[in-house]
């Protein structure tokens, strides 16, 4: 009876039920995300062991570069137990790296068999700065059909849980942190991509290659995203806001451009199929 009343009042919201292809791709993408987390834990375990035993890389050497890996291969311990520990940590790091690479190759193969609309969305999202192939696949797998699920960019932002919490009464307005009542996988990948908008707007060589074959409308949206989000970052930073809060705010606006590109790509795919 309660459901019937809610349906009559228009209080029920239709949900998107993913098909087998979308759900399978989403499982694979999340498995790769779990592998990246395991890889990070393995690296932390190795670096903390080296730090605890007094082994430090040369000054100015960045972690996990080729020079850093050569230095790791030269580290030796006089105690056999410590040497076995080092070898086990090294093997775990290499195993996790191979696992991530294997899953990324599997994603590349599976995407080739995905529906045409999803492939167009993935290609279109790569026009944005900070969103390469794996990030675009993750966003497309988590969102599904963008134009039918989200009527506006604001709906998509709410789905990600990036809106600030609010506890207001009368004239008192009190806002807190973001609600996080949404898709955590989507929110993570968007905030990670938002860090690229700290830099001045430009189209580098890799981004220029990703623009090849895309429509001018999508490229124009991507350029607007660069200029607007960089200005947003500079404005919030000059105001003295916390860096993490700034990135969440930039990521929230980035979702609007993701929605615009996704809708354009899906509409173009529908028009080509109809023709």
Image (tube, rainbow, N blue to C red):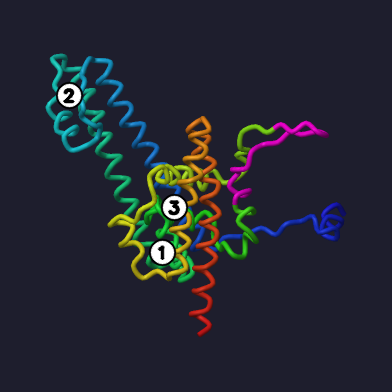
- Number of disc labels: 3
Of residue 55 and residue 27, the one placed in the foreground of this image is: 55
- Residue placed at 54% from the left, 49% from the top? 253
Task: Kindly report which numbered mark, 2 or 3, lies closer to the viewer in this rendering.
Answer: 3
Tell me the element at label 2. loop
> Which residue was labeled with disc 3?
226
- The stretch drawn in magenta includes residue 164: yes
Up/down of 221 relative to 84, above or below: below
> Which residue was labeled with disc 1?
123
Q: Residues within 10 Å of mark 1 (few under 14, many from 20)?
A: many
Of residue 120 and residue 2, the one placed in the foreground of this image is: 120
Tell me the element at label 3. helix
Task: Kindly report which numbered mark, 1 or 3, lies closer to the viewer in this rendering.
Answer: 3
Up/down of 17 relative to 99, above or below: below
**With 54 as the anchor, is 39 left or right in this view?**
right
Main SS of residues in magenta? loop
Q: Is disc 2 in contact with disc 3, using a CB cutoff of under 8 Å?
A: no
């Amino acid at each position: 009876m309660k459901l019937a009343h809610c349906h009559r009042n228009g209080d029920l919201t239709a949900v998107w039920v993913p098909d087998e292809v979308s759900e399978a791709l989403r499982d694979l993408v999340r498995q790769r995300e779990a592998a990246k987390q395991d890889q990070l834990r393995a690296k932390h375990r190795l670096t903390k062991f080296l730090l605890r035993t007094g082994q430090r890389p040369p000054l100015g050497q960045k972690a996990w570069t080729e020079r850093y890996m050569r230095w790791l291969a030269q580290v030796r311990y006089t105690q056999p137990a410590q040497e076995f520990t080092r070898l086990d940590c090294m093997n775990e790091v290499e195993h996790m790296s191979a696992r991530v690479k294997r899953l990324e190759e599997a994603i590349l193969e599976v995407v080739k068999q995905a529906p045409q609309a999803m492939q167009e969305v993935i290609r279109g999202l790569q026009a944005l700065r900070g969103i390469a192939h794996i990030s675009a696949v993750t966003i497309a797998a988590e969102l599904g059909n963008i134009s039918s699920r989200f009527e506006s960019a604001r709906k998509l932002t709410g789905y990600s849980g990036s809106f600030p919490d609010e506890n207001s009464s009368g004239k008192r307005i009190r806002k807190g942190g973001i609600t996080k009542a949404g898709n955590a996988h989507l929110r993570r990948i968007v905030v990670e991509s938002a860090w690229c908008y700290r830099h001045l707007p430009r189209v580098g060589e890799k981004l220029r290659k990703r623009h090849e074959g895309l429509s001018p409308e999508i490229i124009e949206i991507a350029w607007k995203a660069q200029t607007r989000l960089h200005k947003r970052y500079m404005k919030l930073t000059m105001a003295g806001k916390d860096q993490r809060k700034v990135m969440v705010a930039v990521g929230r606006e980035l979702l609007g451009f993701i929605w615009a590109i996704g809708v354009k790509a899906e509409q173009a795919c529908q028009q080509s199929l109809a023709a």
